């Protein structure tokens, strides 16, 4: 995606002179941005992959804007420098758009600040576009414990573009049963030590079966009924979910659709693997939350080892260690009209015997009491790095 600039002048102005005087400003923005801004017309938007920005280059353009603005997609981005009364015109235009219920942002300030906003906007628009390429499969029925985690597939598709399909558990079982051990490919050449040969072979077949099903249905995201895997195979499939996530197939557990949608959005925004986990313990005195789960993308770990599920003592779970540092927590609900978002610091990796093996301790920037008040069900997405502003911008685009 390129950043396209449509220039708006007053008919009374000397456009050539204004363009020449604004060149140092434009070049400085491009320097901080690390890419060139492309001149566009409204017709170019339909032909190319552009983030369209209307640059107010002088005052007196308000009426002209009224005649052309509907040729541009919303939300409207108005770039205005400190020259030729451009900011005054941009503020008037902003008020005009707000009264019509339109989203609008004025990009104004130092060249470095403007470049940062343009970069953030570009990343958010790219994530919005890439989410529309996702086909997600719900394999089997969601866990009966997810009584507060329903999802409206139509609303999700309308807002995010993500398409969701229910796949009967029998279809998942058929794909797994068709797999022979020698058919397994990809990262499943990993050989966890200390497990029975039959357990490892079963995990290999589950992994390849889920991978084959995803290819057949053109899914790039799935959520699996783990209880069905246990019923059919006396196995959990957690090793398979870890590997699939590492390979780029976003995979969640328990048939939790809101959690899967949250994983997709987070992955597309930050372009990194993410960790799906449940809060297990909150300490108000230290403002800490412990999160845990039995699978995590291997390529998100500094190190890892394989263990059995702490409750079931079956299957292969992963005990992963994540690099300490800043993190972002995210979860959106099944109607995409409410979300939880917070930043914090991952301060420790734990190995408590009473929790799923991958365990992290996170200190939040905001009071943990807010988490209890604003929480959305039982699964959350942990992303490395501080991305609150990026999430907020994306979420504003899908309102």
Image (cartoon, rainbow, N blue to C red):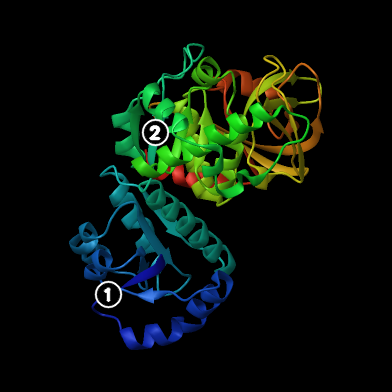
Q: Which one is nearer the viewer's eye here, 136 or 110? A: 136
On the image, which quarter does residue 365 sit in? top right
Q: Which residue of the protein is positioned furthest toward the left in this rendering?
A: 67
Write down the residue under mark 1: 10
Left or right: residue 127 compared with residue 353: left
Whole-percent x and y of residue 112?
Answer: 59, 67
On the image, which quarter does residue 353 sit in? top right
Left or right: residue 81 compared with residue 16: right
Whole-percent x and y of residue 51?
Answer: 38, 62
- Does residue 316 lie above or below 107 as drawn? above
Q: Which quadrant is home to the N terminus?
A: bottom left
Whole-percent x and y of residue 219?
Answer: 39, 41
For mark 1, give the secondary structure: loop
Write down the residue under mark 2: 137
Q: Is residue 337 visible?
A: no
On the image, which quarter does residue 315 sit in? top right
Q: Is residue 3 visible?
A: yes
Q: CA distance from mark 2 to mark 1?
A: 52 Å
- Does residue 65 lie above or below 338 as drawn? below
Whole-percent x and y of residue 383?
Answer: 62, 42
- Does residue 266 lie above or below 307 as drawn? below
């Amino acid at each position: 995606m390129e950043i396209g600039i449509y220039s708006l002048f007053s008919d009374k102005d000397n456009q050539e002179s204004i363009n020449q005087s604004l060149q140092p400003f434009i070049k400085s923005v491009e320097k901080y941005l690390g890419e060139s801004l492309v001149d566009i017309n409204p017709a170019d938007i339909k032909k190319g992959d552009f983030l369209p920005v209307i640059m107010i280059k002088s005052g007196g353009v308000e009426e002209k804007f009224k005649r052309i603005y509907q040729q541009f997609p919303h939300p409207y981005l108005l770039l205005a420098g400190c020259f030729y009364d451009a900011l005054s015109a941009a503020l008037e235009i902003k008020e005009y758009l707000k009264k019509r219920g339109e989203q609008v942002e004025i990009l104004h300030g130092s060249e470095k600040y403007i470049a940062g906003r343009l970069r953030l906007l570009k990343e958010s628009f790219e994530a919005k576009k890439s989410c529309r390429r996702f086909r997600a499969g719900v394999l089997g029925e969601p866990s009966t414990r997810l009584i507060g985690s329903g999802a409206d597939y139509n609303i999700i598709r309308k807002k995010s573009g993500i398409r969701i399909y229910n796949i009967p558990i029998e279809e998942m079982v058929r794909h797994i049963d068709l797999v022979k051990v020698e058919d397994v490919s990809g990262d499943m050449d990993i050989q966890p030590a200390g497990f029975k040969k039959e357990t490892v072979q079963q995990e290999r077949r589950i992994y390849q079966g889920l991978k084959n099903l995803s290819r057949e249905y053109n899914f790039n995201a799935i959520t699996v009924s783990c209880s069905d895997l246990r019923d059919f195979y006396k196995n959990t499939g957690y090793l398979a979910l870890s590997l699939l996530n590492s390979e780029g197939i976003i995979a969640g557990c328990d048939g939790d659709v809101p959690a899967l949608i949250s994983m997709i959005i987070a992955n597309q925004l930050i372009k990194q693997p993410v960790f799906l986990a449940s809060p297990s313990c909150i300490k108000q005195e230290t403002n800490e939350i412990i999160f845990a789960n039995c699978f995590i993308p291997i390529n998100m770990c500094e190190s890892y080892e394989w263990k059995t599920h702490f409750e079931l003592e079956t299957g292969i779970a992963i005990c992963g260690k994540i690099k300490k540092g800043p993190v972002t927590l995210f979860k959106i609900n099944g109607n995409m009209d409410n979300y939880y978002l917070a930043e914090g610091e991952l301060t420790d990796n734990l190995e408590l015997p009473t929790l799923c093996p991958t365990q992290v301790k996170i200190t939040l920037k905001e009071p943990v009491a807010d988490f209890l008040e604003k929480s959305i069900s039982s699964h959350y997405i942990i992303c490395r790095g501080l991305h609150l502003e990026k999430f907020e911008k994306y979420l504003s685009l899908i309102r």
